[in-house]
């Protein structure tokens, strides 16, 4: 069975991205390419990374009016991503349009509450419910829209899975025990995330910033 770990390759440098992916490829199930990589390297960069033969999770967190998101998703078809992200907060019609526009082989997962936010941050943007409740609300919306799953933290994934048995649950904000949190506020360990029902673990800096990324990936894999 392939590893649930997708490595977040957050760098604007294609050569660095290729080098890191090459180092850890035997210990990960796929490559997650996000805004930093895509804004610098575009379709060409994704195409080059795809040559490594691992599934690509293209995390562009689309969030716009339904028509614009649908057209953007269509423009990504040629890259054949295994997974793409949209923001659940874009609303039902936007999520439905994104799913309808994605090819059958691309999972559409909806970002609920970013793992860098806590309840105080939610309050700042006018969301008066706790992260846990907001994730449940947005997961329900994503499910109604026909999305394949959601992105949430390891703190909410168990409840989300209980409510949506066959959903696909992407969990970032994952840190080995005692690891540096950085900007993540709702973090759990890889083992905890998996035990609580994560389908995919997104892990970036704990591996990419390690002195030996291959060793870091192997150490995390050994805890699963
Ligand atoms: O959609 C994501 O992948 C995502 C959602 C979220 O709520 N939090 C989050 O950290 N991510 C992404 O997951 C990765 C986490 O990276 P590290 O914090 O370095 O492990 C980054 O590429 C983020 O863009």
Image (cartoon, grey):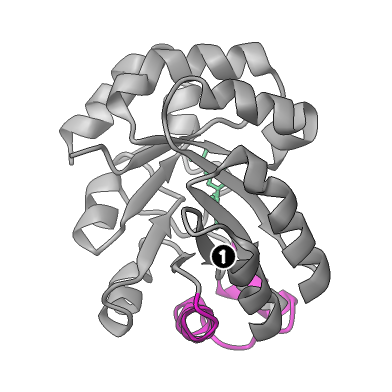
Residue 219: x and y in percent read: 24, 26
Characterize the magenta stretch by its predominant secondary structure: helix
Kindly tell me whether residue 11 is visible in this rendering: no
Instruction: Identify the residue at image location x=18%, y=41%.
Output: 224
Quarter assignment of residue 124: bottom right
Residue 95: x and y in percent read: 63, 75
Residue 82: x and y in percent read: 48, 47
Between 102 and 158, the residue placed more toward the observer is 102
Residue 198 covered by magenta stretch: no
Residue 128 covered by magenta stretch: yes
Task: Please report the bounds of the magenta region as a residue range.
Answer: 117-146
92 relative position to 212: left or right = right
Quarter assignment of residue 45: top right
Between 97 and 15, the residue placed more toward the observer is 97
Instruction: Identify the residue at image location x=55%, y=70%.
Output: 112
200 relative position to 118: left or right = left
Q: Which residue is mark 1?
A: 111
Residue 133: x and y in percent read: 47, 85
Q: Is residue 113 above or below residue 71?
A: below
Kindly tell me whether residue 23 is visible in this rendering: yes
Element under disc 1: strand
Q: Is residue 138 above or below residue 101?
A: below
Instruction: Identify the residue at image location x=47%, y=85%.
Output: 140
* Mark 1 CB within 8 Å of ligand 1: yes
Instruction: Identify the residue at image location x=65%, y=41%.
Output: 78
């Amino acid at each position: 069975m392939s590893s649930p770990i997708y490595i977040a390759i957050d760098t604007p440098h294609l050569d660095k991205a290729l080098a890191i992916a090459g180092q850890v490829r035997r210990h990960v199930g796929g490559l997650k390419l996000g805004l930093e990589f895509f804004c610098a390297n575009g379709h060409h960069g994704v195409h080059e990374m795809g040559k490594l033969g691992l599934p690509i999770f293209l995390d562009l967190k689309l969030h716009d009016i339904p028509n614009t998101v649908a057209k953007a998703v269509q423009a990504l078809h040629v890259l054949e991503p295994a997974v793409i992200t949209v923001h659940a907060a874009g609303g039902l019609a936007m999520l439905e349009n994104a799913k309808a526009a994605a090819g059958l082989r691309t999972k559409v997962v909806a970002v609920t509450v970013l793992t860098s936010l806590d309840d105080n941050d939610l309050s700042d943007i006018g969301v008066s419910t706790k992260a846990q409740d907001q994730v449940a609300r947005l997961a329900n919306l994503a499910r109604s829209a026909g999305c394949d799953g959601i992105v949430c933290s390891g703190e909410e994934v168990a409840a989300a899975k209980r409510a949506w048995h066959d959903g696909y649950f992407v969990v970032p904000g994952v840190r080995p025990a005692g690891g540096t949190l950085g900007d993540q506020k709702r973090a759990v360990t890889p083992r905890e995330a998996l035990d609580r029902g994560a389908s995919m673990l997104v892990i970036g800096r704990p591996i990419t910033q390690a002195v030996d990324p291959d060793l870091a990936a192997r150490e995390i894999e050994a805890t699963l």
